[in-house]
Amino acid sequence: MCLKTLQIFGLLAVLGWGTAWADDGELVERVAVRNRLFEVAQRWELGLHAGAPLLTFLTDTYNFNLSVAYNPTEWLGIELRGGYALSFNNATAANAAAEFYPRVVERLDELPDTWRMGFNGLLGVRFQPIYGKLSLVADVPVHFQLYLWAGGGLASLGRTSPTLCLAPKTSAGDPAQCVVTDATGTQVRWEHYLSEQRLAPVVSLAVGLRLFIAQHHAVSLEVRSWSYTDSFYVNVLRGEVSPSSPTRGGQLAPNRCFPELGGPKTGDLAEPTACFTTLGQVELGYVVLF
Amino acid sequence: MAEPSGPPQRSADQASTPATRLVSGAPLADPNVAVHTVEAKADPDQGALEVVLFPLVVQLNGKFTQHLGTMGALVWHLHENFALQITGGGNWSAAESSFNDHLANQAWVQPQAATSLLWTWGVMGGVEVAPVYGKFALLEDTLVHFELVLSGAAGVGGTSHQLKPVTRRIDETLSAASFGDTGTRFLGSLGAGLRIRLGRSFALRLEVRDVVYTARVSSVNGCSGADLSAMDAQLEAGNDPASTPVSASCQRSLFTGKTGAGDPRSTDINFALNLVNGDHGVPSSDVLNNVGLYLGASFVF
């Protein structure tokens, strides 16, 4: 999972990469983007943002945030944002649960990256050094700002394990409570799986584009990551778990980040380790500037 | 008394003040003047030939696979906003993802063979259009010109699939994963990105391209299901599969003998047979999208 974290951070870094090559330019060139039609310095902002997942693994997350920001200068903004993320185990998780349930396994290692985000709040800094204009086909100039965002905060996290069923079917006589197959198909009864909640610190990075549509209105489009620590259980005695002893015999996976770096990829020989879970989101926003 | 003809005369003080320098064209005090803000392209492209190197191409949608590669492109700008292009290169790292490993090892599930097909090389030809041209200021002093480029192309490429995962030998050392060639496929590509000009001859490119290809694993290393079944039967009978009669396209030598590390290649036969047979003897099929981030630099002739 850490490679995925790097992948998303790499994308953010690359997309936000500034191109600081000077061009002597004519006076007309300099004036073209220095006389800004839309100035944000010393202005407050109120925004509404909706994010959808860029790439999903076991969970899907749709995040909705309200934001308040202040721009001390043209190139710097401070933003407070908070909201709620609708998140759930997706079809891949359900498929894994349905396939794994009938297996005869004495000890069980859970899957990583199953924590989902709920309520969240962030305080961050927006570095917005790039102001530009582009010419669309009809010669309509569009003014934009390109920015990098970094910040942190807190989020309520929850998870439902796709493999740790608390009503295991260990013999033919046990009723199949976790995965039921009937005339309507196969259904995973998530209420019978291990479920946990916690509050955790979150780090968020983003790169984005703001298109000004009027003096007081802008539309934003950004790619944003949300990262928090992962945790899950390994070596659980599958046949002995119950709602009162959901992780019997097991322990938390060791928290070692970046095992992929510096060593051979060992595939199924690697001991499961917990690291960070990173959600990549593409986010659309509407901002009112005062 | 008649007004004097000709342009108004400026005093010597006015002429020496930078704020009063004249530039041709529209009133620059208006920041929304379209003509001078974005239409004056500093470095025209028409007729130019551009050689592009993408030293690093990273797969962005690596759910079941992870690809890293290097690509190159030749772009001939027929018009200021239209060009022909040829792109080619390979993925020097193409493997199943860690997510795939977790699914296989912790949940005992894995995607069907076609879904985890790996893309190894490709050559595509197509067009590129640049409908949007712009410039931006970095802080207050640096001006950068850029174009939004859209591309479409079609071509062919090679594919492979992991056969044997990493395993541990009796002496506790690790045996590397093995891969089998699963044939050539038609490729299609759509892309969008930025082309940032650094003067007359150089540009930086940052593009996202989606390479689409169909996947149906019906042979491995040229060997069909019948070939693999025959070799598997020989192996089961305790014979050397090297003597098994196979079709002309089957590269039997890739399933016989030993690897450089001393591992028997015959262990791949059963893995390959399972790939080709799929579920209930029907090879799996899928349409795959490999969305990659292309980072590169180019020289414009």
Image: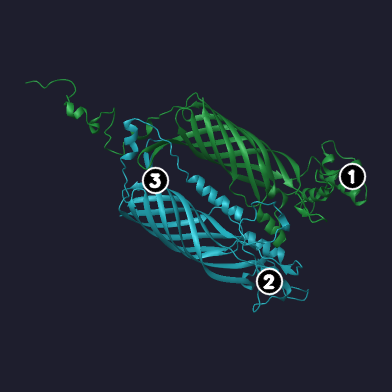
**Mark before the other along the chain sequence, 2 or 3:** 3
Q: What amino acid is labelled 3 in the image? A: Pro
- For the N terminus of chain B, the image quarter is top left
| Image spot of residue B31 (x, y percent) | 30, 39
Q: SS at mark 3? A: strand
Q: Mark 2 lies on which chain?
A: A
Element marked by disc 1: helix
- Chain that the image shows in green: B
Q: Where is residue A27 shown, x and y percent of the image? A: 31, 31
Pointer 1 chain? B
Chain A representation colour: cyan
Residue A129 is tagged as 3
Q: What residue type is labelled 1?
A: Pro
Query: Dot 1: few (<14), some (14–19), or many (≥20) neighbours within 10 Å?
Result: many
Side (left or right) of B180 relative to A152: right
Residue picked out by circle 1: B241
Q: Can residue B93 be seen in this view?
A: yes
Give the spatial CA distance, label 2 vs label 3: 50 Å
Establish whether labels 3 and 1 are both on one chain. Answer: no
Residue drawn at (24%, 33%), measured in percent from left and top? B19
| Residue B104 % position (x, y) | 71, 58
Q: Where is residue B55 in the image (x, y as percent from the top left)?
A: 59, 38
Q: In this orientation, which residue lies closer to the viewer: B146 or B125?
A: B146
Q: Which residue is drawn at 53% across and 59% down?
A: A227
